[in-house]
Image: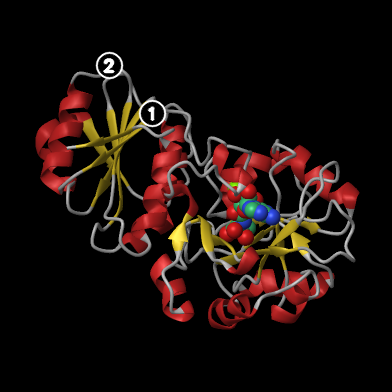
Amino acid sequence: MAFPTETVYGLGANALNAEAVAKLYAVKGRPGDNPLILHVRNLGGAIALAGDFPEHARKLAREYWPGPLTLVVNKSPALPAWVGGHPCFTARTVALRVPSHPSALALIEAAGVPIAAPSANKSGAPSPTDASHVEADLGGAVDYILDGGEISVGLESTVLDVTGGGAVILRPGAVTAEMLSAVLGTPVREAALVSGESPRSPGTKYRHYAPRAEMTVVCGNPEACAAYIAGKLSAESRPGGILATAQTEKYYKNYFKDRIHFYTLPEAGDSASGGLQPGEIAALAAGDRADPQTVARNLYACLRRFDSLGAEVIYAEGVGESGLGRAVMDRMVKAAGGNVVFV
Ligand code: TXA
Ligand code: MG
């Protein structure tokens, strides 16, 4: 069953039932070596599944749970070896999170078991931030979709490895490095930024969050970004998409005049696919550069919208990396398969 959390929609199953968990992997088309987050109702529920739950991790849990923080801890030896991942694999650690969405908490409470829940999208696609996205990806394959309406964060939780006394960010999210450092009193680093270190969160090695179109992230000040993107799309014959910001709409309107259509979210019931003609350009303002939260909330819906419009090439404006901007850039760059230019 799919259900809303404050970050993205999850596809949930009893984390202790091997058959149910195997089905999760099959429905998503998820590689078996990519483990799952177990959703629990409170810190006590998390401690019960952990081999050890270190004091610094408890401090973070007390501060940020319920909320968009996942803690990777050593697993309780009392649990079957596979729990935390695919039943054909062995998991030494387990990723735990207490979501804050009331529907998610009610579901965990009613189930009375930890709920394993990856994002409720087909593996590789952008995570769902609306029940309609779940329906589009997994509609025929899930029994129920609990429609929780609007999602507040829009990007997946921060994944933090707290084993071995450390605190390493495996996936940036709404609980930022600064927020974690403030509680721990020491700087918290991000795994992927350390050169030579292989990704410890298996999920980070796969292409993720990606639209069907070829995507490029363009970083720079608003005017320079708009000029670069306008130049590229002027020479482009395929239907194009621009992930713009509130600051740049005016430039594109000026460059492209009536070749460009500005769309809004949510799509007003017109999910018809392939709407764009060759040489036409669809633009979506993801949000405000000064407020990365707005971009975070709309990013995946925008990428899905470009797909449904039939865009074949997308240029997305990058945002500043402070606060939640870091997580936004992480997802954008992955969606673009690492295709980034600085102007
Ligand atoms: O916000 C979220 O975290 C959403 C909602 C539904 O809770 N869930 C989510 O799950 O994004 P998923 O499966 O799409 O991403 C989980 C990430 C993957 O990158 C996975 O590799 C990592 O967490 N992960 C899970 N268990 C792990 C473990 N034991 N050690 C390291 N990384 C782990
Ligand atoms: Mg996912």
Residue 230: horizontal and vertical position, in percent? 17, 31
Q: Tell me the kind of residue under disc 1.
A: Ala
Query: Considering the image in quadrants, where does the C terminus appear?
Result: top left
Which quadrant of the structure image shows residue 307?
top left
Q: Residue at (54%, 42%) from the top-left corner? A: 198
Which quadrant of the structure image shows residue 323?
bottom left
Q: Give the image's coloring scheme.
A: secondary structure
The answer to which of 137 and 188 lies nearer the viewer is: 188
The answer to which of 164 and 114 lies nearer the viewer is: 164
Query: Considering the image in quadrants, where does the N terminus appear?
Result: bottom right
Q: Residue at (56%, 38%) from the top-left corner? A: 205
Q: Bin the neighbour count of mark 1 within 10 Å (Cα to Cα): few under 14, some 14-19, many 20 and up.
A: many
Q: Is mark 2 within 8 Å of ligand 2?
A: no
The answer to whether residue 257 is visible is no
The answer to whether residue 52 is visible is yes
- Identify whether 280 is placed above or below 131: above
User: What element does badge 2 sit on?
Assistant: loop
Residue 309: horizontal and vertical position, in percent? 41, 32
Q: Which of marks 1 and 2 precedes in the sequence?
A: 2
Q: Distance between the residues labelled 2 and 1?
A: 11 Å
Q: Residue at (23%, 62%) from the top-left corner? A: 290
Q: Is mark 1 within 8 Å of ligand 2?
A: no
- Identify whether 57 is placed above or below 273: below
Residue 284: horizontal and vertical position, in percent? 31, 44
Give the residue pinned by disc 2: 237
Q: Residue 231 carries which label?
A: none
Q: Please identify the residue farthest to the top as the structure is shown.
A: 237
Tag 2 near tag 1, CB within 8 Å: no
Q: Tell me the kind of residue under disc 2.
A: Ser
| In this picture, residue 113 sits left or right of residue 314 | right
Q: Residue 311 carries which label?
A: 1
